[in-house]
Amino acid sequence: MAYNFRNRNLLNTRGAYLGSSGSDSESQDDSDPDFLTPSRTPRRSTQNNTARAGGASSIRNLSGKRARGNGEEHRQGLRERHRRRRKRFSQVPQAQISRRTVLSWLIGSGVIEEKEVVWYVAAQSGNILGEGKVNREGILCSCCSGQLTVEEFEVHSGRKTRKPYQHIYLAGSQVSLLDCQTEAWEDKEEEERRTFNNIQPASKAVDRNDDACMVCADGGDLICCERCPSTFHPRCIFMEIIPQGDWLCPYCICKYCGNGAGNGPLMQCGGETLDLMNPPVAFCGSSCRKIYEGLHNLLGSQNELHDGLTWTLLQRTDEPFTGSYGEEEYKRIQCNSKIAVAWLVMNECFLSTVDRHTRANIVQSIVYNRGSYVTRINYSGFYTAILEKNDEIISVASIRVHGKRLAEMPFIGTRGEYRRLGMAYVLENCIESTLCSLKVEKLVIPSVSKLTGMWMDKYFFTRVQEERLVKELSLYNTVMFPSSVVRLHKNLAMLPDLNLSPQENEGHF
């Protein structure tokens, strides 16, 4: 197939093709093939701009303006923000960034400046309750010289609204950090990372099918689906005899009767019976609905763990911002911002994993759950799990659930300075516990051969060898890896659900 690309120059191609799941909590940096210390040429320009701060005790007194609220005044704030002289790039090269926080992302995006003065402003009165200077790790308080997280700065200022970014303002421009998050997310460079993978066959292409097998990602002698661009090696789908005439792939036939007749879309997932006489719904049964609702109820909610660690489930959303900044909209902005930071962490941990046929950046597409017309690189439905401490994202994992039968976790990575501390183990346990509570039966991961023993000994995964499971995996649109990558799985149905309270013993011992 000859492809029409959206824009190849925008893709990150700094490394060779590599597809594997990284184990970073137990392996040395120099022995882990999934970890690469970036050796980028600094592309940030150097400017010497200082924050401007006034001495007023209330934000109302600046230029005769009061604190901006919601709706139209929020939009007015964004317009004023764009008129402000904007420093496009951070002064610090990406390789030297010590923390991955939302604030470091805003500084790196050029939306705010390091050491810029910020105020915590009371919502009703507009009084300034706290002052500090923003940096990549948090906010340096002016009154006590303490280094605080954004939420700690709010508490230190005498408030606990659970929306600190909405009430912390840049002193010079009177723009809230929440407005800054929206501006950074709508930046052109950030937008290009999450757009639809719009890869189409070239208009004059003779062969309009894909060039790689849907199961193993290799080329060669492929059998082509007559309805979609998907192609397969006959051996990868256990086809013993090549059929004569038109052939439809597993994604274009009914999962239950095997019939591909008709032109309507086929809804496929966990195995529930469809009532075709009723209007179609987004779910084929109660199990899939419960999984979807369970995951979405977790989105954006921080779950506290031990030693100040928290884990959060994220997924990018494209719902437009209204400026009302209600509970759900605030949560969406935080989810999107942390997705952007999670991508920066993944980009540190993995070589640039680029599909060699379409040149799509696989890891980036997974983190931003980008869709595509080409099934093989359609990564919609992915979730991102993050482990944080003091607002810093230290470990990231990507998961996608394929109904109640299985979930996949193609990538998990931890920042270099937190390796060998069990951070990936903590995050993986949180993911397993969540999947168990949702009654998902299996978790499947890929692993390079060097790390297979570690995954099996310390995480209790086993090789995918059972013929039934191998055949079943070929029917799901899971992320593909080269044949050198080993597939492992864990039976989650055998694990205890840590979210359930212990049962009382009826007998006495």
Image (cartoon, grey):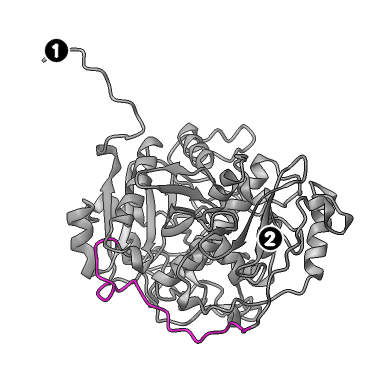
Residue type at mark 2 is Cys
Relative side of 333 to 487, left or right: right
Q: Residue 110 carries which label?
A: none
282 versus 204 height, above or below: above
**Which residue sits furthest left?**
509
Q: Is residue 224 among what the camera can see?
A: no
Q: Give the range drawn in magenta.
A: 25-46
Kindly identify which residue carries mark 1.
508
Give the residue at the far right of this rendering. 64
Percent position (x, y) of residue 417?
A: 35, 67
Which amino acid type is marked by label 1? His
Residue 487: x and y in percent read 28, 60
Relative to 330, 84 lies left or right: right
Residue ID at (52%, 73%):
360
Q: Quadrant of residue 206?
A: bottom right
**Residue 269 is at least partly visible in this image:** yes
What secondary structure is the magenta-colored segment mainly? loop
Q: In this view, does 333 lie above or below 371?
A: above
Label 2 neighbour load within 10 Å: few <14, some 14-19, many 20+: many
Q: Residue 180 carries which label?
A: 2
Q: Is residue 87 magenta?
A: no
Q: Quadrant of the C terminus?
A: top left
Task: Identify the residue shown where x is 41% and y is 60%.
Answer: 394
Label 1 packing within 10 angstroms: few (<14), some (14-19), many (20+): few
Up/down of 330 relative to 487, above or below? above
- The residue that appears at 50% across and 76% down in the rendered structure is 94
Q: Which of 252 and 337 is in front in this view?
A: 337
Q: What element carries label 1?
A: loop
Q: Which of marks 2 and 1 is nearer the N terminus?
A: 2
At which x and y percent is residue 66?
84, 50
Residue 100 pos. (x, y %)? 48, 64
**Where is 296 relative to 391, above or below?**
above
